[in-house]
Every structure is written in structure tokens, then in C-alpha cells.
Image (spheres, helix red, strand yellow):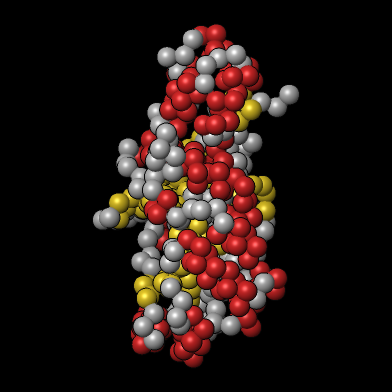
Amino acid sequence: MTKIDIKSLNLEELKELLVKLGDKPFRAEQIYEWLHVKQASGFEEMTNLSKGLREQLQEISEVTNLYMMDKLKSRGGETTKYLFRLWDDRVLESVLMKYHHGNSVCISSQVGCKMGCKFCASAIGGFERNLSTSEMLDQVYRIRKISGERVSNVVVMGTGEPLDNYDNLVKFIYMLTDENGLNISQRNITVSTCGLVDKIRALAEENLQITLALSLHAPNDRVRRQLMPIAERYNMEEAIEACDYYFEKTGRRITFEYSLVEGVNDFPEHAHELAKRIRGLNCHINLIPVNPIKERNYRQSEAGNIQNFKNILEKYRINVTIRREMGTDIDAACGQLRKSFMDKTSD
Ligand code: SAH
């Protein structure tokens, strides 16, 4: 019999489990607090439960924990990258970023990724498996505990396509924002997707207040297809319409991510074309200087071109920021640390 992954149960499910065990539902609240607030790593720590109940729980369920294998701090100290080992020996990465307005944790949603974006390190090793809800939560919990820092923001922008792991992701968001857990504000959570249109529309119906970020990276389908295989499945129009629908339903402004790759999507005419397409939408554009990975020969746009791209968008009165590069000295960009670890171990 496989044991229940108890940290993936929400409070309701935990109550049902306790009733099944012949115990009182209020015990569920105590256990939930142990797991999600005090971050106990096993039942033996739950000292206000009877020994009998702890043994019963131990028999049918388990508390899975991420094991920290490595921790790398960037030179300025504002970014720390964590490499974690999962129960099945697979490896994932998460990042803590310290900003003036609070600390942000960037989590992975899958081990590997199926999406195959050309510039992304996570695409290279292929897909291994989805992360469970508890494995997503635990990235935030472990980083909070190890660093001793408060975590106010969570971005799902690490390895993986979050909407390809939809059910676990949505449960993760509900549990992370549960007042009985860490109680992080939904408005402080961002989910980034390459554009799984059906799932964006489903997310719009969830009644959540999270920010949706769409990885656009191109002003038209022709350029987008060169960089992102998903563009063959859904065209840009459909993806943007789905985002507009998300905005209509939630009132949350959309973020478009645009990684600038020299000579591919960074020409002034691309900026004009992009601006004309998204003008009038309630959105914000995040320009990201592409982080070159050694397996591909994409280069970062020159600083002058990036600035020019931004200026053009601003002429159309579009909200735009250039993402500050943090932690490139520690391979903090998108799957790069995990990738370099895998390279080392496969030699
Ligand atoms: N699967 C999600 C999350 C991916 S990572 C998505 O596609 O949105 C978050 C962002 O970083 C995405 O916009 C992704 O396209 C971008 N990204 C990945 N590798 C990058 C690189 N080497 N340089 C710049 N941006 C990159």
C-alpha cells in the first residue's frame, strides 16, 4: 500500500481522514498547523498529539521532506539558489530573492519540462515528472526555515510548466494562501505560463486573485514559433484572448514576459508590432535580457537595444520594466543550476 502524502491534504481532507481514524476533526487543525506553519518534519515532533494517534498516522501516511543538497549565494547576497533532493532522488531548484519590498521565492512546478522552449535550460533534459502539492509547498517552507527570512511573495517561474500540472498547482495556491497555513496573500503569487490556452481559461474560473504571466517572447506567430514549440499548438491571438478573459474574470492585470534574444526578437519593428497588438489591454510587459545557456548559441540583446525596445513600447503608453538580472553568477536563471548539477553527475 502506498502511504498518504499527508502534506498534500488540505484542511478539509485532513478532517475527513481524522474522522475515518475515529478521532476528532479539531485534531486536523493541530496537525495542519504542525505541517504548514511550524513545518514539522515528522509525526514525532507533534507533541500535542497522543502517541497512539501519531502511530496511527505514521502507519498510513508520511511526511515527505525536501532535502537540501546545496545552497549558493550570489555575490551581492540578494539571491540564494537552493538545490533540493526529492524522495525519489530526483533534483529540483528554487530561488530566494531579497527585494526592498519583501522576499520572494521562485519555485519549480515539475522536474524537467515538456515545453521545449529553445532558450530554456529546463527543456534540455526533458520531462521527468510532476511535483506534488506538498513538494511545491515544501520549497517555500524549507527556504523559509533554512534562511530564517519571511517570505511575502511566491512566483511559479522555476523549472516546469505550472499549467501542465494544473490540479496540483491550484491546490498548492489554495493551501499556501490558507489562513491556517502560511497565509500568503493571493495577490503576492505569480504563475508564469508559456500559454496553455485551455488551462488559462480554467484558471480564470477558479476565483483566485493571483497574477498571471504569459511568456510571449515574440510580436507575431512566425517569430514565436522559432522560440517556442507551444506556438504551433496555440497561436498568439488565442493566447492573448485567454489572458484578456483572465483579466475580465479576475480584474488582475496580466504580465507579458518578453526575453530579448539578439537578432531574433529584439528589432525596433518587433517593438512596434508588439505594441500595436497589445495596446488597449490592461497589461504590463517585463523585458528579460535572455540568459545565454551553453547548449544554445543565443545571445543577449545589447543594453542599448533593450533600452530602445523599452522606449518604443513606452511611446505607446505601455507599462514596461526591464527585469533586473539577479544571481547570474550562481546560475540562477531558469533551470541552470539543476542542469549544471545533472551535467556533473552524468560524467
Ligand atoms: N513554463 C513557464 C515558466 C518558465 S520560467 C513559462 O513558460 O512561462 C519563467 C520565464 O523565464 C519564462 O518566461 C521563460 O520563457 C523565461 N526563460 C526561460 N529560460 C530563459 C533564459 N535562458 N533567459 C531568459 N528567460 C528565460
137 and 246: which is toward the camera: 246
Image side of residue 14 versus residue 235, left or right = left
17 and 271: which is toward the camera: 17
- Using the rendered image of the protein, determine whether residue 291 is visible from the camera's viewpoint: no
Residue 313 drawn above or below residue 108: below
- Using the rendered image of the protein, determine whether residue 194 is visible from the camera's viewpoint: yes
Residue 151 drawn above or below residue 231: above
Q: Residue at x 70, y 70 (%)?
A: 233
x, y percent for residue 61? 61, 23
x, y percent for residue 222? 64, 83
In which quadrant of the rendered image does the N terminus lie?
top right
Q: Residue at x 61, y 51 (%)?
A: 166
x, y percent for residue 286? 42, 71
Image side of residue 305 versus residue 232, left or right = left
> How many marks can you see?
0
Give the image quarter of residue 221.
bottom right
Q: Residue at x 49, y 40 (%)?
A: 175
Q: Residue at x 58, y 30 (%)?
A: 13
x, y percent for residue 265? 53, 82
Give the image quarter of residue 141.
top left
108 and 37: which is toward the camera: 37
Q: Residue furthest left?
A: 100
85 and 39: which is toward the camera: 39
Residue 19 drawn above or below residue 343: above
